[in-house]
Image: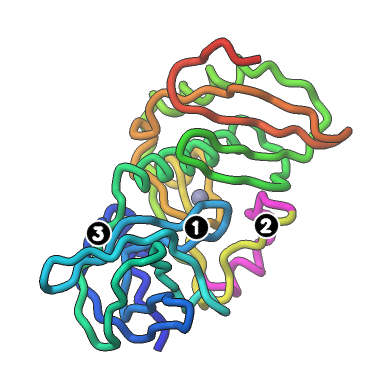
Amino acid sequence: MPVDALYRDDFYLSTAEAEVTTIHEDGGIELNRTCFYATSGGQPGDTGFLERADGTKIALAQTKHGATKDIIIHVPLEGEPQPLVGEKLTLHVDWPRRYRLMRMHTACHLLSVVCPYPITGAAVGEEESRVDFDMSETIDRHEVTAKLMELVGQNHPVYVQWITDEELSANPGIVKSKNVRPPIGLGRVSLVCIGADSSVDSQPCGGTHVSETQEVGAIHIAKIEKKGKENRRFRIRFGAPGAEA
Ligand SMILES: [Zn+2]
């Protein structure tokens, strides 16, 4: 039975009830449903804890996919109690961490609007995110920060539209990433849209995002590094611009 990945339809769901379906030899836990995001598309998986009926907590080190995206494995920290198959648990995502990741992830989308170049890699982090672009131009990071903050301040709605794998294959132009595969294989693909009628952007993405750009808050480009002749690595950090190089 594929897991019911509740976060795909509700990015703001931080708690849910679920039942244990499988315990792996290494202690990994599969559930019938989950609000824990599993590592993919450059966004790290959720941490948090699973609560047993008696109130005992099972703290999680990470959440990851199994052999396919239909499998989500909750990996407990070492020494945590092991639940039984069929046991009912209450799930608690580490929400402050996840919310920062959602803000950062959305910021990466905004950066791809400000810098409309093919993306060759991306990694979302709690403190810093990086996006690599296939570009040879030199850009002033303060200018990029100003444009990012303009998009944040305009408070555009951010929402998901579902399209079929076939619709995506018929419109390859909407994929901005060069090396990162769009989230296909589930029969439907989530298109993350920014602005009314996608006026700002739309991009296939299976991650979690905030619902309006103002939630991103203050961000800035801390660094733009030259990684080869045609590759620029942008580092996004929270807060107002600091003294970084
Ligand atoms: Zn995304």
User: Residue at image x 59%, y 46%?
Assistant: 123
Circle 1: is it few (<14), some (14-19), or many (20+) Cα within 10 Å?
many
Q: Residue furthest left?
A: 54
User: Residue at image x 45%, y 43%?
Assistant: 194
Residue 25 pos. (x, y %): 47, 83
Q: Which residues are magenta?
A: 163-178
| In the image, residue 172 lies in the stretch drawn in magenta | yes
Q: Nearest to the eye among marks 2 and 1: give it.
A: 2
- Tell me how many marks there are: 3
Using residue 159 as the reference point, say whether residue 85 is left or right of it: left
Q: Nearest to the eye among marks 2 and 3: give it.
A: 3
Q: Secondary structure at mark 3?
A: strand
Q: Quadrant of the C terminus?
A: top right
Q: Does 29 appear above or below 157?
A: below
> Residue 45: which numbered mark, if any?
none
The kind of residue on which mark 2 rests is Val
> Residue 180: which numbered mark, if any?
2
Q: Secondary structure at mark 2?
A: loop
Q: Quadrant of the N terminus?
A: bottom left
Nearer-N-terminus badge (3/1): 3
Circle 3: is it few (<14), some (14-19), or many (20+) Cα within 10 Å?
many
- Front-most of residues 95 and 103: 95
- Disc 2/disc 1 C-alpha distance (Å): 15 Å
> Residue 191: which numbered mark, if any?
1
The kind of residue on which mark 1 rests is Leu
Using residue 99 as the reference point, say whether residue 72 is left or right of it: right
User: Residue at image x 53%, y 49%?
Assistant: 202
Q: Residue furthest right?
A: 229
According to the picture, the residue beneath numbered tag 3 turns out to be 92
Residue 133 pos. (x, y %): 72, 39
